[in-house]
Image (cartoon, rainbow, N blue to C red):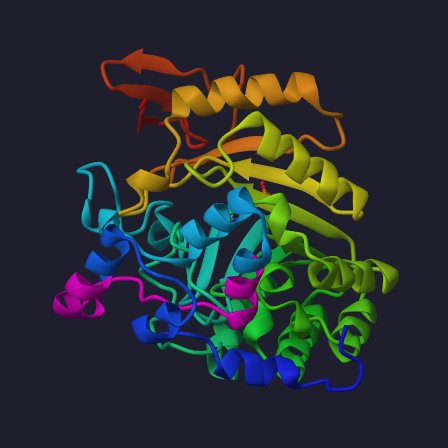
Amino acid sequence: MKENNENSWNDELKGRLKKRSQLEEYIELEAAQAAWFTQSEEKGDDILPFMTSRYYLETALAAGPDGRAAILRQIIPSAEEFVVKDYELSDPLGEAKYSPAPRLVHCYPDRALILVTDECAMFCRHCFRRSFTGGMKGALTDAELDPILEYFRCKPEISEVLLTGGDPLTLSDDRLKSIISRIKDVRPEMIIRLCTRMPVVLPSRITAQLVAMLGSYDGIWLVTHFNHPSEITIEAAGGIRAMRKAGVPVLNQTVLLRGVNDNLETLSSLFRRLLSKGVKPYYLFQGDLAAGTSHLRVPLEEALRLTAELKDLISGMAMPRFAVDLPGGGGKITLPSQHHQLEREGDFFTVKGLDNEQYRYPAN
Ligand SMILES: *Cc1c(COP(=O)(O)O)cnc(C)c1O
């Protein structure tokens, strides 16, 4: 934690790298990476731009060979992103179907999700909300929050709200505090889940002031996004420690990614290290069927094998739930499941979604 300069994170955010030339000051691009930059100029606004914090790029360069490759694969786009499978979607979770108000998603009876901003400290190449993030829509306004709060007033069954985006911790402390307190005014008992990658990609954001503000409320949970043990730096661990000391519990969700963490050794070491820092591994997600991400996805069959072995290898506390979001709004199901049995049909599995409809998911 940088006690001396509370707002250095804002300068770091402003100094995010967005240009090929800035990246090339650090590393030499591979052919497929260079091809992305060349071709992206013709594609216009339809693609997720390149962007990273300097800190996260430097974390990659300071890591061992495995950590370096794993982090760079999340940072640097590849021309493989231009390969779009016919089963891939621009809104893979079907969130539009469950949106009763702009920026509000209500898919499960007792939980709702607010897209508080489309800003991030970096763009993850595996982003499943890539058609929303970086769209220059900016921070949630009070005028946008009004109908959302009205909706909460009409739905007493909602007991938990996820603040996500984008990354909610790109907002200023004041804006975040205002959103949280307006939600708490409507429902004091509301559980608020802050879904953020800032502890991983811009840990200076975890200032003493932010931590004190979040710690002043009951029922705030931080859910972060570590994908590789090399991301757990001294700075990242410091931010987590500060949150925990202030009484903010920390969970983690990991995305299973080809060439990043798709082996037993990396996953077991990631989850053990998180647990040793007081972070509970909550979810391990199968890569969503987002357009242009097939090169980063692990085939579901292989993912099931890997997670079954992992479960036998590590402690119950270290083991996250393995979950798949069924394409087009079938919901999040945890696997293996008695209730959601996978049936093989050619190159696809069929499986019953949370709405009891049948959904198809590619097997490999
Ligand atoms: C994942 C998700 C949640 C939270 O689900 P949990 O299983 O409680 O983590 C809530 N709403 C939406 C739309 C989601 O995608």
Q: Quadrant of the N terminus?
A: bottom right
**Residue in view at x 65 percent, y 21 percent:** 311
| Number of numbered discs visible in the structure rendering | 0
Residue closer to the observer: 108 or 345: 345
Residue closer to the observer: 1 or 62: 62
- In the rendered image, which quarter is residue 280 located in? top right
Whether 86 is among the magenta residues is no
- In the rendered image, which quarter is residue 93 located in? top left
**Residue in view at x 34 percent, y 54 percent:** 96
Range of magenta residues: 37-59
Q: Is residue 158 visible?
A: no
Q: Quadrant of the C terminus?
A: top left
Q: Is residue 140 visible?
A: yes
Dominant SS in magenta: helix
Vertically, is 280 above or below 42?
above
Vertically, is 351 above or below 57?
above
Residue 9 place in picture, x, y as percent: 62, 79
Vertically, is 173 above or below 227?
below
Residue closer to the observer: 91 or 144: 91
Residue 213 place in picture, x, y as percent: 77, 75
Residue 3 place in picture, x, y as percent: 80, 81
Whether 56 is among the magenta residues is yes
Residue closer to the observer: 148 or 307: 307
| Furthest residue toward left | 42
Q: Tell whether 113 sits left or right of 352.
A: right
**Residue in view at x 59 percent, y 39 percent:** 283
**Residue in view at x 35 percent, y 63 percent:** 132
Vertically, is 336 above or below 43?
above
Residue 286 place in picture, x, y as percent: 45, 35
